[in-house]
Image: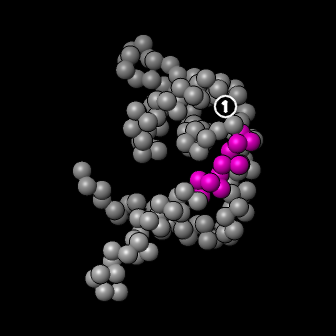
Amino acid sequence: MNESDWLRLDAQLCFRLYAASRTVTRCYQPLLAELDLTYPQYLVMLVLWEQDDVTVKFIGDRLLLDSGTLTPLLKRLEQSGLIRRERRQENEREVRIMLTDSGHALRDKAKSVPLALKDAMGLEIEELTELRTRLDHLLAQAKAPA
């Protein structure tokens, strides 16, 4: 590939990642509609299903989201009755997030989502595992400018 080809759209890694992300998110939409969740809300719930009663900062760190993006998501999940937000008396700035009984119960309904997504994407488990490994490597190696 010569130097002028590097500015072609189809030569851009970022475009492939962007398009793949949008495509995967669209595959999730009908699956998550059955749970009455958006994709970002689903990500928050995944964090909480792994570990309940955590801080907003913990969730933001896991999802690579700032509190300005996360707060509206958490408010909607609270309005839906899936989580509780609670300020700690000993530290008013710290907000803890806990699953409600409904939030815990939704986990059972969500168990079918990963395999349904695999089927929707037309990939085998081995292909998904390899892709995830390569993306993990990319995320670990890439340094975003400060």
Q: Is residue 142 above or below residue 66?
A: below
Q: Residue at x 38, y 16 (%)?
A: 92
The question of residue 2 being in magenta is answered with no
Q: Residue at x 65, y 24 (%)?
A: 81
Q: Residue at x 60, y 66 (%)?
A: 128
Q: Residue furthest top?
A: 89
Picture quarter containing residue 3? Answer: bottom left
Could you tell me what secondary structure mostly forms the magenta stretch? helix
Picture quarter containing residue 8? Answer: bottom left
Q: Residue furthest bottom?
A: 1
Looking at the picture, tell me which residue is in the foreground, 23 or 44: 23
The question of residue 25 being in magenta is answered with yes
Residue 77 shown left or right of residue 109 in the figure: left
Q: Residue tagged by mark 1? A: 103
Residue 78 in picture, x, y percent from top left: 59, 24
Amino acid type at mark 1? Gly
Looking at the picture, tell me which residue is in the foreground, 92 or 21: 21
Residue 52 in picture, x, y percent from top left: 57, 33
Q: Is residue 46 visible?
A: no
> For the residue labelled by badge 1, is the local secondary structure a helix, a strand or a loop?
helix
Residue 12 shown left or right of residue 28 in the figure: left
**Magenta span of residues:** 24-35
Residue 129 shown left or right of residue 55 in the figure: right
Looking at the picture, tell me which residue is in the foreground, 120 or 7: 7
Q: Is residue 137 above or below residue 45?
A: below
